[in-house]
Image (tube, rainbow, N blue to C red):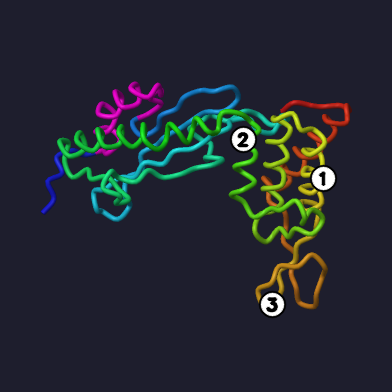
Amino acid sequence: MSRRDYGSFASAAKSRFRRVAEAVGFQQISGVFYAKQKVGWYEVFSLQASQYGSETFYVNFGILVPQLCPVAEAKDIRECGLLISERLRNIDETGGFDARSKAEMEENAERVLVQLRKVAIPWFDNLDSWSRIAAEYYERNPIQEEKIGAHSIVYGADFRSATYGYLLLRAGRTADAKRWLLEAKRLMSLPVYYTRDGRTVHEKEKFARVQKQETHQVEWLQNVNDTLAYIEGGSLTLR
């Protein structure tokens, strides 16, 4: 039987995790979101309450970049997804942390602090430059140097190629950034058709229907084009 003695998880967590955040040098942005500002990016950890009524929560941590594309507007960090992320495991190697009562949440806040120091902080320390962040992003995503010119957008290679290109630009590798942004442009410019048997193709087939680009996809391509113009020393309109 549940011993839960609080209403909102975020409200109950706010006071119990403020000191956890302070102990590792993070700022409390909300009851469930904590960040440390670096040079152009943030180190973040966040609490995620279970959606299945088990009164368990998880701790995700990772790298967040509010303005990766140089021509795009910076986003509020609370609205950004994590560029690279991991999840803490409890000290007993189970996945989640219990929060069936305020007292249990208090106890598990201490466990989270132990794991942040043991796991998350060394992980952040290893990603201490744009070059290392770019390398980690490349390792984690299904894009490959040898497939430039042959990637498919089926698994999001268009967005991933652009993201990797922006990271390389941040790392000062302008020529490499240009190659990946050109790959992103190629992919984003391809027409996309859905066939009757569920395939995604770039050349029109009988009975295939064209996919209309959504607003965010049009913006992605515009950002890539503007960034390439910026690299070439052309005109650049910041938005």
State the quadrant of the C terminus. top right
Disc 3 is placed on an element classified as: loop
Which residue in the protein does label 2 denote? 132
Crowd around label 2: few <14 · some 14–19 · many ≥20 (10 Å): some
Q: CA distance from mark 3 to mark 1?
A: 31 Å
Q: Nearer the viewer, mark 3 or mark 1?
A: 1
* Mark seen at residue 191: none
Crowd around label 3: few <14 · some 14–19 · many ≥20 (10 Å): few
User: Do labels 3 and 1 touch, CB within 8 Å?
Assistant: no
Amino acid carrying label 2: it is Arg
Q: Nearer the viewer, residue 150 or 91?
A: 91
Residue 158: x and y in percent read 71, 51
The magenta-colored residue range is: 8-30
Which label's residue is closer to the chain start, 3 or 2? 2
* Mark seen at residue 182: 1
**Residue at image point 79% right, 34% down:** 227
Residue 129: x and y in percent read 61, 29
Q: Is residue 116 left or right of residue 192?
A: left
On screen, residue 126 above or below 212: above
Q: CA distance from mark 2 to mark 1?
A: 22 Å
